Amino acid sequence: MPSLNPYLSFKNEAREAMTFYQTVFGGDLDVNTFGEYEGMVQDPAENDLIMHAQLTSPDGFVLMGADTPSGMTYEKPAGISVSVSGDDEPSLQGYWDKLADGGTIVMPLDTPPWGGKFGMLTDKFGIDWMISIDPAQD
């Protein structure tokens, strides 16, 4: 079955970011560096940069990320957000609290006109997030 997974690009902080996301979502983090594969970077100083990292959380989230070596153009993410939603308010509130640490709240996690809770933030790595907690069902 196909899957759709966010793949985040970083300049030189993929290891720090993906380790941070592991503290947010839990789970297993697998990391491969450019140095593990001969000829993947032109500058040997970039061998320890992350070529591919994959976080698989207990909730089934799969979040991937990598550094951008100097031989490639890096552009900060723009025009896209990673959205996490559901009805498990304690878990979603916990994700919000951890992602907000060191980040910037764009829209506080609060009750929108459609009910439930919704908020937007940019984390300390410049990644935009939306958290949506479904309205309680009576």
Image (cartoon, rainbow, N blue to C red):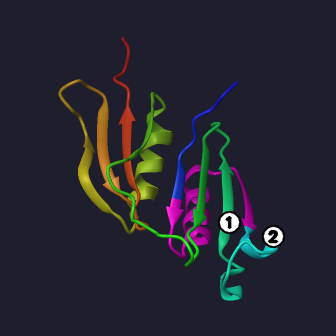
Q: Amino acid at mark 1?
A: Met
How many circles with numbers are drawn on the protein? 2
- CA–CA distance in space, label 2 to label 1: 9 Å
Q: Assign a secondary structure to mark 2.
A: loop
Residue 88 to residue 34: above or below: above
Residue segment shown in magenta = 9-32
Residue 38 percent across, percent down from the top left: 82, 74
Question: Residue 88 vs residue 34: left or right?
Answer: left
Residue sitting nearer the eye, 94 or 22? 22
Q: Answer few, some or many: residues within 10 Å of disc 2's Cα (few below 14, many 20 plus, some between 14 and 19).
A: few
Q: Is residue 2 left or right of residue 81?
A: right
Quarter holding the C terminus is: top left
**Can you give x and y, in whole percent of width and height, for residue 124 in the image?**
40, 67
Image mark for residue 74:
none
Q: Which mark is residue 51?
A: 1
- The quadrant of the rendering that contains the N terminus is top right
Q: Earlier in the sequence, mark 2 or mark 1?
A: 2
Per the image, the residue denoted by label 2 is 37
* Residue at 56% in and 58% down: 21
Furthest residue toward left: 113
Q: Amino acid at mark 2?
A: Tyr
Residue sitting nearer the eye, 74 or 23: 74
Q: Is residue 40 magenta?
A: no
Q: Residue at x 67, y 59 (%)?
A: 53
Q: Outermost residue toward the bottom?
A: 45
Residue 22 magenta: yes
Rendered location of residue 133, percent (x, y): 38, 32
Say whether marks 2 and 1 touch (CB < 8 Å): yes
Q: Quick check: 88 left or right of 62?
A: left
Crowd around label 1: few <14 · some 14–19 · many ≥20 (10 Å): many
Task: Identify whether 20 is placed above or below 135.
Answer: below
Residue at 77% across, 76% down:
35
